[in-house]
Amino acid sequence: MTPERLIDLHDGWQLAEAPEGLAGPALAGLPDAAWLPARVPGTAHGALLAAGRIPDPFYGRNEAELRWVGERRWAWRLRFDAGELAAHEDLVFEGLDTYCTAWLNGERLLDTDNMFVPHRVDVRERLRPGCNELLLCFEPALARARAVEAVHGKRALWNGDSARLHVRKAQYHFGWDWGPELIVGGPWRAVRRHAWSARIDELQCRSSLDGPRATLQVAAELAGAGAGQRCSFELLDPEGRCVAEAVVPASAVARATLSVAGARLWWPRGLGGQPLYTLVARVLDGERVLAESRCRTGLRTLRLVQEPVEGEAGSSFHFEVNGQAFFAGGANWIPDDNLLERIAPARYRERVAQAAAANMNMLRVWGGGVYEHEAFYEACDEQGLLVWQDFMFACGIYPANAEFLASVRAEAEAAVKRLRHHACLALWCGNNEDYMLAESVGLAGPGVQAERFEARAIYEGLLPEVCAALDPDRVYWPGSPFTPGADTKSSDATVGDRHSWEVWHQQMLPYQRYGDVQARFVSEFGMQSHPSLALLESVLPEGERFPESRTVQWHNKAGSATGPDGHRRLAVYLADNLRVGPTLAEHVYATQFVQAEAMRVAYQDFRRRWQQPGARAVGGALVWQLNDCWPVTSWALIDSAGTAKPAWHAVRRALSPLAVAVRLEAGQARLAVMNGGLQPCVLTLQLRVFALDGRELAHARLAQEVPASTSLETTQALPDFTGPVVAELCALDEAGTELARDCAWTEPFRFYRLGSARIDIRRDGQTLLLGCDRPVKGLWLQGAALADNFIDLVPGAPRRVAVAGAWPQRLQVMALEHAARVVAIPEAGG
Ligand code: BMA
């Protein structure tokens, strides 16, 4: 019996266009000149780009010129030496996108039609000790999908070609209202050779807590293990020390119970640490380890709570971890690139870290992308970000024929088995907006018979079945948004989750009215803005660098059946709020300004309604969207170069463990304090009101005690002043140190002029001192890594902002109504 070997087959691949009608050995026989070097995991687009055979699909309007790549057949060839063969030899394909046929040494191995289903093929009889040839041929997915659509019929959808509904492939590949149509294909996940005599197929770990004691039911599905062999289980604590172990006879499914006294609990960030335990299973032949499998997990309990909300209709929708209720503040995650092979694990960690640094504690993996890379979930485990995990259905009326359901079942089982051990995984969700779409086409909603919406068989049948069987301790939610019960609408604001798109989509409400579109859990809302000027210009030909250009519009995919409308909606929000200059730089700042203000208002208006136990009116807010997959004008907080926009800072402040919000109302200011911590806090609320010429009109201090995990509100009279004002609200601790701050201005900003304020920027050690003589709105500093940015200044003590990393020689300074300028930073006192 020899120990198992898992060998990556990633180097030495070649790619060639596969002529129509050619298959198997005939393909492998294409002339050498036809073959390009390729890497696995990879895509044909990626290999052609690396070989300089196609231009950057993200530049200009190249996307349109490159449709041909997705319309061709592509062959992938690998010749490798297998050396000594083991008792068992498998080829493992973690992901083939999408319609692929594989041959080994001329023998057909498998045909695939679902990019989310991994395949293991026994090749013991076909693998040779010497040279072997593995060949993959990928068919054009759109053409194949259209052939299936022709059989099953066209269906309603939002975004992309309707044939996408019939193919189990990342839906955003077909184009989305923030993404290009790039129908990539190829071995997008790992290809491996598994040589073994015994192996561990599945490892499962179900934990429960009883006070400080954790009990883990562990199970390992074994193959090839024989009589006299044993299976050992070891649980390692975060430092790698063994804290529990068991050894049992090796059988088809080896089971054991492990117990840990003094279990260290995993918490979402902001509530506690993220200690991760590692379960290690081994098949032992005497002392020799034949096979090993390990998974990391966290010990915690998690509940979705739907309880009455005092004084209101419906029920709450909030989460509790380890018995502690908390407000879920976060974002929707989309794939971070169109060519996923370009995303290294470090990039997942960086993006997740950016979400964490914005004080987020939840990310929703949205249903039009992919079941994400391991590195994503590991980063969420480590950084304490819970994951709302959609199954991969988005904005469509999906078929429910037997063949489709069988493919979905295999996909769902693979996803649940792969992800279920992650501490970060909070909830499984059936789809994105399919109930909403069904309602919009009369297939669901009040008075509509349930069976008219046949995809319920997936969201209310197949998927909950798979989750109940393979991951019974985790919540399953049929869709986002979703409202339980017959005759309900997914837009119901009193039960379940909701997508509040009255701002931006639908009636395009002003963002100042986010408070009117709250819900028990706002799982989508958003406002568009341009990416950074540098990124935008990097994809614009010289002559196209103005806001209204054809290429700028090309990089805004928002729109509907009537065509692109992102630029028009942006124009409305700019016209509502600002005076905007003609240059691209001014347009970038203006759109980012509006997005930042919209995010400030939205998160504050939703989080204020977290309130107190028994009255959890709003349990969470997940903005659409955290990230981008290419250089685009979109709802993202972080552009595709990884640059955080001003909105990211607005979200970071609004989700800060202790945060404040101020609203100007007739004759009074409404003050809110949000304490997300586990301890009550005693503080002073300081409200200062300024005229725009810098005069301080009022200064008030209120003592306030805020219980743990509570949001509360109060009001304070405003001075009798008819002109526009700025109100600055700060929460101070007993020592007078500022804990949180927010500013509210008389709006809209376009009614008054601000440009004459003097902005003073000085250095004090590793800190910037930012001062002014009159109020300054939206000070946006570029050129350094700053702890705070997009800041409002009021006269008085300068704001101190820490600078991380190298001290910048120069900073680019922008603010509302202030022309952009680049400044050197003098020392303080100089
Ligand atoms: C919702 C999301 C996405 C879309 C976004 C912006 O529909 O689910 O499908 O990109 O709004 O329009």
Image (cartoon, grey):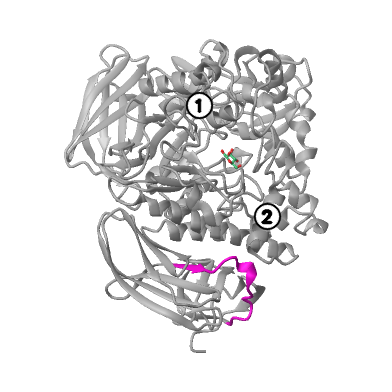
Residue 134 in the figure: left or right of residue 270:
right
Q: Quick check: 619 above or below 83?
A: below
Q: Which residue is mark 2?
A: 572
Residue 446 numbered mark, or none: 1
At x 53% / y 10%, what residue is drawn? 125
Quick one: label 2, few (<14), some, or many (20+) residues within 10 Å?
A: some
At x 42% / y 44%, what residue is drawn? 380
Tell me if residue 787 is in the magenta stretch: no
The three-letter code of the residue at mark 1 reads: Pro
Q: Nearer the viewer, mark 2 or mark 1?
A: 1
Q: Quick check: 379 above or below 760?
A: above
Q: Quick check: 428 above or below 658?
A: above
Residue 179 on image: x %, y %: 66, 41
Residue 775 on image: x %, y %: 54, 77
- Corner quadrant of residue 161: top right
Residue 362 in the figure: left or right of residue 529:
left
- Ligand 1 position by quadrant: top right
At x 50% / y 84%, what residue is drawn? 695
Q: CA distance from mark 2 to mark 1?
A: 33 Å
Q: Depth check: give the residue in front, 176 or 641.
A: 176
